[in-house]
Amino acid sequence: MRTLITGKNGQLGQSLNKIISTNAKINNNTNPNEFIFAGREELDLSDENNINNYFDNNDKFDIIINCAAYTAVDKAEEEKDLTNQVNHLAVKQLAEIANKQQAKLMHISTDYVFDGESDEPYLEIDETNPINVYGKAKLAGEQALQAAMLTNAIIIRTSWVYSEYGNNFVKTMLRLGQERNELNVVSDQIGSPTYATDLAEVILKIISNKNYQNKEQSTEVYHYSNEGEISWYDFAKEIFKIAKINCKVNPITTQQYTTPAKRPKNTLMNKDKIAETFNFQMVKWKNSSSNCLNQLG
């Protein structure tokens, strides 16, 4: 099986690389798997011609896992064309290429396709209504993929991704907690954090499933995050508790913390579908936070 993983320098790409490179079960003589990691220098999703050239100059893939995305939510409000190209048009192009190559496509999307006004965790079939440029482009990417691939594609919506790699909330809090005695953190945006390593494990379990590999299946959307319901304020307090950082955290409202892009207030997602379909045990967010902070030392 030849599997392409885009976004090799991102949080999820690096998490996948770490697991694959250290797990002998994934690569062995009886079940040979070839994983090809591509970053922007090899496969630039902001450039339509570059995408075509990459696939024209490489052997066919059996599976394409698209971890690449434009994720700067606030900056996206200014860079609308670039956001749309990477999160929408490039996804459409990847879907068309996957169809042509008869490859399976797995695409990572976001909770920001929802407006955050629901009182219940969102189901995959619930109405989408993104409220910022980033969310609108990600939803357009989902819709383009679904139109291009009626079968053999999976969309996984995830939320609040963090890891040992790149820039994320956990690493920002660790830095600010060392620099300051007191921080104000938004307490009225609710969701579930996702440790990129846990999401990477889920992806690898899905693609190693024989039914997934050998059968043509209808294109599906799934939700995945760690288990639990928290605010950014709760998350910050837990980070400082685990890391033993003495920094006071003050709860503030979204209204008190203005940003260029609007944020949805409640993006909790129901994850029953992915758990039942692939027989997963969901990992609690506190356990995953501890695992990540232990890795960070």
Image: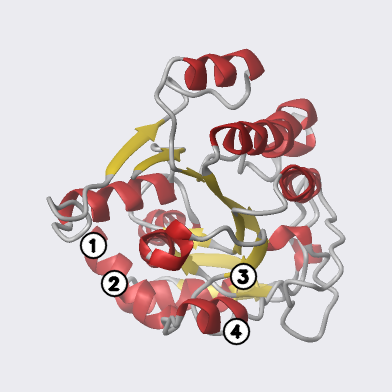
Check the image and tell me how it is coloured. secondary structure
Q: CA distance from mark 1 to mark 2?
A: 6 Å
- The residue singled out by tag 1 in the image is 295
Q: Amino acid at mark 4?
A: Asp
Label located before the other in sequence (3 or 1): 3
Q: Amino acid at mark 1?
A: Gln
State which mark lies toward you, 1 or 4.
4
Labelled disc at residue 272: 4
Label located before the other in sequence (1 or 4): 4
Residue in the image at 47% along x and 25% along y: 40
Q: Above or below — where is 38 with respect to 150?
A: above
* Residue 70 in sight here: yes
- The residue singled out by tag 3 in the image is 223
Q: CA distance from mark 2 to mark 4?
A: 24 Å
Q: CA distance from mark 3 to mark 1?
A: 26 Å
Q: Amino acid at mark 3?
A: His
- The residue singled out by tag 2 in the image is 291
Q: CA distance from mark 3 to mark 2?
A: 22 Å
Locate residue 62, reporting x and y percent: 44, 42
Residue in the image at 41% along x and 21% along y: 58
